[in-house]
Image (tube, rainbow, N blue to C red):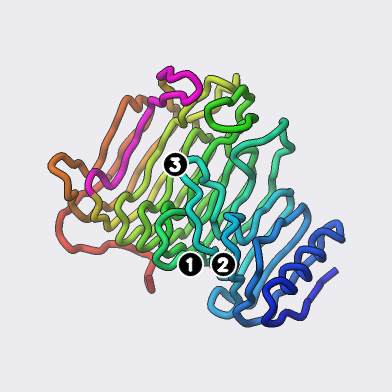
Amino acid sequence: MTHRPLLGDDAVDNHRVLQDLLDSRPGGKLELPPGRHVLADGLRVPEGWTIRGVSPDGTSLVALERTGHPVLHVLGSGVSISDLALCPAPSDPGEHGGDRGTGLTIGEYLYRDAPSWVESVDVRRVRVDHGELRTANGIAVMGAVRDTTLHDVTVTGGYTGVAVHWGAAGTDVSSITGPTFHPNRLTVTDLRVRDAIEGFYLSSVHDVRLLGACLRDVEMGFRLLPGDNTDRFVSSPDIGARIEIADVCVRWHGPLYAVRVAGWGRSEVDGVVSVLAYRDAVIRDCRLTGAGSADTWSPVLFERASGVELRDVRLTTGAADHCRLSGF
């Protein structure tokens, strides 16, 4: 069933109309009209829904209240989101609030109980605009999420453009008891990030492919990380396996590095340091342009990350721009 709701200038009414529709039916198609549609708060998206506008330039959802809720929060499987611009309200979710204040979050960071996996999510032709804000991420993929595709995504402003992070059962980051849940079978293609702190990061994941990204005017390009707790709360041998990052151009200006690859993590539960052994992980065909502003800097910072192959990573301090993603 296809739904084409009428939306107006009242943010509270718009939010009520859309959330009631999403909550009242077991899936369907929600076609949003052209225009800039204000919302009093973000929307929870349950399973089975397709949400689409006419184009990222033609349809936008703008959150007004500073609750920290994502503009769209995908909490169920079989969801498709396309042809939209998402404008979060200003928020400062803090160091461990990576799934808050975003334009789009798929999954969650902390769970009260063991969750059901969110899977088969498709995101295409979506733009997130944080404006001058640098405290919240653009898009978050966190916790029990798998079989998900992000294609032709643009993020302007914010902290990290696309943050991919493990999740866990626990009330806060210092009291995690496990198990942990690690995004996997994720594909990201044609990603554009501009004027953010960081382009993207992958933390404690497996079976992830990120192919084609243009990261411009960022302080950091991207990071591959083991997570604060690496794999200590999960018995799966797959964490850190089969990761490919390829065809990425970075134009950076931060103090420390364009790329960080780390294998060690320090648990915030008890401070124990552990090391993740990556397997079949490769970073290839990347162009890094820029220079650090601190006394000690390196284009690539590589820390105890055995099992990660670097192949054809080119560095320049000039003004060259080799990005194949035009028009950005």
Q: To which residue does mark 3 refer?
A: 244
Q: Are marks 3 and 2 in contact (CB under 8 Å)?
A: no
10 Å crowding of disc 2: few (<14), some (14-19), many (20+): many
Q: Report the front residue among 64 and 113.
A: 64
Residue at 67% x, 70% y: name it: 52
Residue at 63% x, 42% y: name it: 145
Q: Are marks 3 and 1 in contact (CB under 8 Å)?
A: no
Residue at 15% x, 39% y: name it: 296
The mark that comes first in sequence, 1 or 2, is: 2
Name the amino acid type tagged 1. Asp
Q: Report the front residue among 169 and 119.
A: 169
Which numbered marker is on residue 86? Answer: 2
Q: Which residues are magenta?
A: 255-273
Kindly report which numbered mark, 3 or 1, lies closer to the viewer in this rendering.
Answer: 1
* 211 in the magenta segment: no
Q: State left or right for residue 122 relative to residue 199.
A: right
Kindly state the secondary structure of the residue where label 3 is placed: strand
Which picture quadrant has residue 261? top left
Q: Are marks 1 and 2 in contact (CB under 8 Å)?
A: yes
Name the amino acid type tagged 2. Leu
Q: x, y (%) of residue 154? A: 47, 64
10 Å crowding of disc 3: few (<14), some (14-19), many (20+): some
Which numbered marker is on residue 129? Answer: 1
